[in-house]
Image (spheres, rainbow, N blue to C red):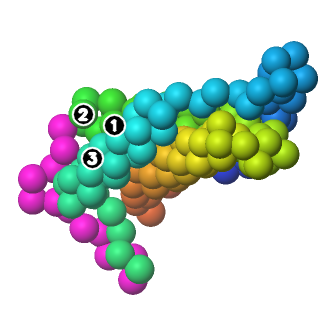
């Protein structure tokens, strides 16, 4: 697996924000009303971000890492390798889904700004903002968790890995 690049996540946010904005414009033009944003979306996304943050904080002491001085820290109760691999896959999925959903709700937020004078428009703005914040928080925590799941490089491994690289 290749590490997630922040540039790719930003591209996903921008593309889906444009789609969210277009969706809000089309719904407003066809119905003359603000696009309804479900309150359950913001609650769910914020809950997922908090759950992922808790999992990240629980996994952090159980993963090997290096200090700022380059010392290697091995945990006393390490995470099993299969759980670490699944955690890395979860982190990659969370960062990508968070970027896509966050961009969509960010676009809806921008598209609903002209409707802020109505009660439905204000409600849509608030709920889209909360959903976008929850999804983008999930993406940020996912990137952090993925970075923690990477194995620290050992200088001795570099000498052995040169023969394996093409």
The answer to whether residue 149 is seen in the rendering is: no
Q: How far apart in space, not on screen, are marks 1 and 3 (Cα)?
A: 9 Å
Which of these two is toward me, 64 or 110? 110
Q: Secondary structure at mark 2?
A: helix
Q: Work out whether 88 lies above or below 153.
A: above
Direction left: furthest residue: 76
Q: Work out whether 57 lies above or below 23.
A: below
Q: Is residue 91 left or right of residue 18?
A: left
* Residue 19, horizontal then vertical, whole percent: 81, 28
- Please name which of the two marks, 1 or 3, marks the residue nearer to the observer: 3
Mark 3 surroundings within 10 Å by alpha-carbon count, few (fewer than 14), some (14 through 19), many (20 or more): some
Q: Quadrant of the C terminus?
A: top right
Q: Say which residue label 3 marks.
A: 55
Magenta stretch?
69-80
Residue 83: give its label.
Answer: 2
Q: Secondary structure at mark 1?
A: helix
Q: Are marks 1 and 3 in contact (CB under 8 Å)?
A: yes
Residue at point 75%, 48% (across, down): 116
């Amino acid at each position: 697996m290749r590490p997630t690049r922040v540039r790719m996540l930003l591209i996903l946010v921008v593309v889906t924000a444009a789609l969210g904005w277009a969706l809000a414009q089309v719904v407003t033009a066809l119905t003359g009303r603000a696009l309804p944003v479900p309150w359950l979306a913001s609650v769910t996304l914020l809950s997922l971000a908090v759950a992922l943050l808790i999992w990240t904080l629980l996994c952090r002491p159980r993963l090997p890492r290096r200090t700022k001085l380059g010392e290697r820290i091995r945990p006393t109760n390490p995470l099993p390798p299969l759980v670490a691999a699944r955690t890395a896959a979860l982190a990659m999925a969370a960062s990508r889904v968070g970027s896509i959903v966050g961009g969509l709700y960010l676009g809806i937020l921008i598209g609903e700004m002209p409707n802020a004078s109505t009660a439905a428009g204000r409600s849509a703005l608030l709920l889209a903002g909360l959903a976008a914040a929850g999804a983008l928080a999930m993406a940020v925590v996912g990137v952090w968790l993925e970075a923690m799941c990477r194995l620290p490089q050992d200088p001795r491994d570099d000498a052995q890995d040169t023969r394996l690289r093409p």
